[in-house]
Every structure is written in C-alpha cells, then in structure tokens.
Amino acid sequence: MHPKTILITGGTGLVGQYLTNMLLAAGHEVIVLTRKPAHQSTKQGLRFAKWDVASGFIDAAAVAAADAVVHLAGAPVVAKPWTDAYKKEIVDSRVQSGQLIAEALRTLDNKISTVVSASAIGWYGADVPGHPAFVETDPADAQFLGETCRLWEAAITPVASMGRRLVIPRIGIVLAKDGGALAEFKKPLQFRVAGVLGNGRQMVSWIHIHDLCRMIIYALYEPTVNGIYNAVAPHPVNNEALTLTLAKALHGKAFIKMNVPEFVLKTMMGERSVEVLKSTNVSAHKIQSTGFAFQFPTIEKALQDLAGK
C-alpha cells in the first residue's frame, strides 16, 4: 500500500479513533475534521481541521490535501431517548454531513478518488424465523432506522456521479474493548450476572472493531470494491449466545444467567428498545467474495480477544 492522506469525519468516535491509529501505524497521514480543531495532535502524521455541518463550512485546504475520505460522522443512535428532537438530530447529522462532503467534492479543488461512507444494518429492519439473511439488494425498512439509513446513503450518493469510487459499508453491532455495545453487555457481568435480553433468540449481526477498520482500509485500496457492502462478521449469533459466550470469556462458569423481560427494556429504553430486541440476520457474503478475510469470524474468537484472554 502506498501511503495516502485520509480525511476522516467522526474521527473522535470509537471507530474513528481506532481507524486513525491503524492508518497512522501503516504510515498514512490522517486529517480529522472536527468542530474544534484548536488542540494539537501529539501523534506524528495526524492533524485536525475545521468543519461545521450546521453552517456548511469545511476546511478547503484539508479537502485539497486528501486522497480519500472516510465519513463516519453522525449522532449516536442509542445514547439518548428518542424524542422527536433527538430523532431529527440523528437524521440531520448524517444527511447534512453527507451533503456537505458531496458539495465540497463538487465545488472545491481536490484529488479525492475514493469515499468510504458509513451506513448501518438498521437499513434492514427485523427478520422473522426462516427468513434468509439480509443482503445488500434488500429494500430499506419503513421504520425510523430504515428510513434514516435510506436518507443517509442518499445524501452521499451524488459523489459516485462525480467519477469518485463510493463504498458504503452497512455496519453491524461493533464490538470493542472500550465503549460501544460490548461495554453495555459487560455491565451486569460486573456482578457475575449474564443479562439475556428478552427471550434471547434475536439474531445479532456483529463485527469486531479490528475487522471493521481493516475492511474500511481494504475498501480504500481495493479498486474492485465499489458500492454497498454489509460490514458484519460471517457468523451472527443470537443474543443469548453472545451474552453467555462473553460471560464464559470473563468468568468461566462462575456466573448466573438472567433474562431481562421485554417490558422492562421497553420501560427503561422506550422506543430505543427496538434496537436491542430486534432480530437482524445479515449476510457477509458479498464482501467475502471480493477476497476480504475476517480475522475474527466467530463470536468465540472475537470475545476471547476482547476479554483479553
């Protein structure tokens, strides 16, 4: 791989930080777009540049310096209750930022050849027993998250008509040591309680953060990768299997299994509970068919790594 300068949005988030470190370790230059770029980086090859989605501002020099863009920005989906105002923020943060990138590529001097723009498996909604795994050509779900993903992808799609290679990974549940979904699964395990959500049969299409970032870098460099790909591990599991595998990785057999009833989750989380109770079985076949190989294809291997054992 020849070193490139990569412009990243959402670079201060969980995935953005991990990806930045991987790119820097491989010798790339990274420019992170942020609303507050005043602080200086202590890492060689990393710098910050200003953008402000609300006002439509983006640093033209940063765009001119970049060879590729990785667009990860967007308000966290489950961080806050889904009030009408926060649902609007979830959508606007994705749509307006995508539109700003597309407009920058259209109007500013740049040599950007590739854009990798995140989406999510919320596109697909819930499956039903016996339903085949969702694939990239399946339509968007009509509920809030499906419609959010549809608008999110539509906002960045114009860059493809500008002669740029556009890759859209629909990202599953990201598992990482620090933060994210795994931190929530670990909370009851502090008390050696394996909290299975609802009936535990809902399928979880997950991905180890290392494989996700490897996939993004692969997309930056592999010219045959173009369009939409599911960014999920090839072996999804149900919630009960994920929870018990994590419990065993952390505590061996010294834990108690406990089901958290659906009504409790709905009371605690409101409309957001759909995200933890929904079953979504998503196929990784398309990205694998390009030659991409997962380092953590199974939940056992992933959680052994993330539990530090």
Image (cartoon, helix red, strand yellow):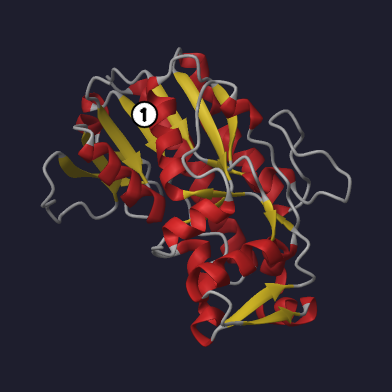
Residue behind mark 1: 104
Q: Nearer the viewer, residue 15 or 83?
A: 15
Mark 1 is surrounded, within 10 Å at the Cα level, by few (under 14), some (14 to 19) or many (20 or more) other residues, namely: many
User: Which of the 4 image quarters holds residue 84?
Assistant: bottom right
| Residue farthest to the front, as pictured | 253
Q: What residue lies at 27% left-to-right and 37% top-to-bottom?
A: 23
Left or right of 208? Residue 220 is: left
How many marks on residues? 1
Residue flagged by tag 1: what amino acid is it?
A: Ala
Q: Does residue 148 show up?
A: yes
Q: Does residue 106 show up?
A: no
Q: Nearer the viewer, residue 189 or 65?
A: 189
Q: Quadrant of the N terminus?
A: top left
User: Which of the 4 image quarters holds residue 111?
Assistant: top left
- Residue 135 vertical position relative to residue 39 in the rendered view, above or below: above
Left or right of 52? Residue 37 is: left
Element under disc 1: helix
Left or right of 5? Residue 214 is: right
- Residue 197 vertical position relative to residue 208 in the rendered view, above or below: below
Q: Quadrant of the C terminus?
A: bottom left
- Residue 237 vertical position relative to residue 259 in the rendered view, above or below: above
The spot of residue 255 in percent (x, y) is 59, 82
Q: What residue lies at 50% left-to-right and 31% top-to-bottom?
A: 293
The spot of residue 209 in percent (x, y) is 44, 49
